[in-house]
Amino acid sequence: MLYDNLSVNAAGHLAIAGIDACDLAAEFGTPLYVLDEDRVRANCRTYVEAVRTYLPDGSMPLYASKALSFKGIYPVIADEGMGADVVSGGEIATALAAGFPASKLYFHGSNKTDAEIAYGVENGVGCFIVDNTNELAVLSREATQRDVVQNILLRVTVGLDPHTLAAINTGRVDSQFGVPIETGQALAFVREALATPGVDVLGFHSHIGSQIFEPDSFCDQVDRLLAFACDVRDELGFVASTFNLGGGFGVPYVEGDPKVDIAGNIAAIAEHLRTGCDHASYPMPRVLLEPGRSIVADAGTTLYTAGGTKTIEGYRSYVMVDGGMTDNPRYALYKSAYTVLNASRASKPADFACTLAGRCCESGDRIAEDILIQQPTRGDIIAVLTTGAYNFAMSSNYNRVMRPALVMIHDGKARLAIRRQTVDDLLALEV
Ligand SMILES: *Cc1c(COP(=O)(O)O)cnc(C)c1O
């Protein structure tokens, strides 16, 4: 099994954190998102402990909400001692509704609206990651109007091209996120921010991308950010107390994908930064990290019910499931690889070559192509692993397919955390 929380039980079924996947499907229906809360907690602890061990006081991992934002995740994140980053009024509202402390929210976004900026300041969001100078002006107005001094970080791009998909690479000079160092605009951005009333600049933020496996990319990022910080110090006399290095640690989706040693990577980044700071006589900043995928991805499994199997003579066989791109658009968007198995026959050999197709009227609606699974018949439960990140978060009602329910497993028990969408929910907004 790809992960150690998965097993095959005596009935020959897939078990998730010890619970029979077919029982979960029978009780809660399909498609169903299953989130192993204990695995989320274990992932949080890996970060929290490594940050505590290797980085200065005040350093903290922040959960990148966009990977999976719903009320049930925030108490887990808070409990494990992490902050959270949020990218919209909706994510802020969800975190606050779950009782998450506003002071531990970090508000991102390349185009925050005036209303969102006001909402964030009004509700005491701990820190804004300011993306550009337009935003700075609005934030200054909203903060000064309320007699608030808002803590901010300035988002810069370090001009790095990690080996990842273009669609999830955000650190290049030519990016809609942040202000580039290379063109000199980032320095001007800092100068302007330092002269702006109502804000207190704590430091810099940079995020180089997602699904990154080599620590070298993060070390390059640290070098570039530190070199920039030194230029800022020399030019403007400002010394940053905080570096936010963003998220991006990769997660294995299929057998053979590398597994990132998160603690080892954090140790390497910390060591690298410390050496660089010593060299430049720069005070070691506190470091924020923003893991999203690596907190929730491998804790999630999606369960579907297989419909028919269709064999196109001379081509391939399709297994059709009762969900697809509406609950998991990642294959359609990025051709992301997934591990699939027949949860009803998990002890049988995986020797049936097929393509897993969703139910939407769209040829691109596939979850995995040319895979081997245990041959299913109609009614079998099909499990797709590693769906905790960017699945529910990216789900849609295309074809008016209703969003699945989500259950969380904790201490050997499953509880409903998000109920299945109904036709009434679907129609509720239509006047
Ligand atoms: C997406 C994103 C993250 C999280 O990235 P993961 O690859 O899920 O860890 C963190 N910070 C920012 C600014 C992001 O855009």
Image: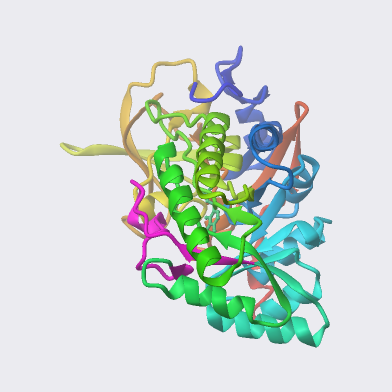
Q: Which residue is drawn at 55% across and 43% down?
A: 278
The color scheme shown is rainbow
Is residue 300 among what the camera can see?
yes
Q: Is residue 31 toward the left or the right of residue 255 in the image? A: right
- Horizontal and vertical percent position of residue 14: 56, 23
The picture quadrant where one finds residue 308 is: top left
Residue furthest to the top in view is 10
- Which quadrant holds residue 79? top right
Q: Main secondary structure of the magenta part?
A: loop
Left or right for 155, reference 142:
left
Tell me if residue 299 is in the magenta stretch: no
Q: How many labels does the image show?
A: 0
Magenta-drawn segment = 153-180
Closer-to-camera residue (306/262): 262
- Decide if residue 349 is on the left or right side of residue 246: left
* Residue 240 x, y percent position in the rendering: 62, 60
Closest to the observer: 358 or 393?
393
Q: Establish if 284 lies above or below 121.
A: above
Query: 286 or 366: nearer the eye?
Result: 286
**Vertical relation: 153 (above or below) 341:** below
Residue 30 in view (yes/no): no
As for residue 165 lying within the magenta part, the answer is: yes
Image coords of residue 418 (percent x, y): 71, 51
Q: Give the image quarter of residue 76.
A: top right
Residue situated in front as seen by the camera: 186 or 214: 186
Q: Residue at x 49, y 15 (%)?
A: 347
Question: Is residue 206 left or right of 313 when viewed as pictured?
Answer: right
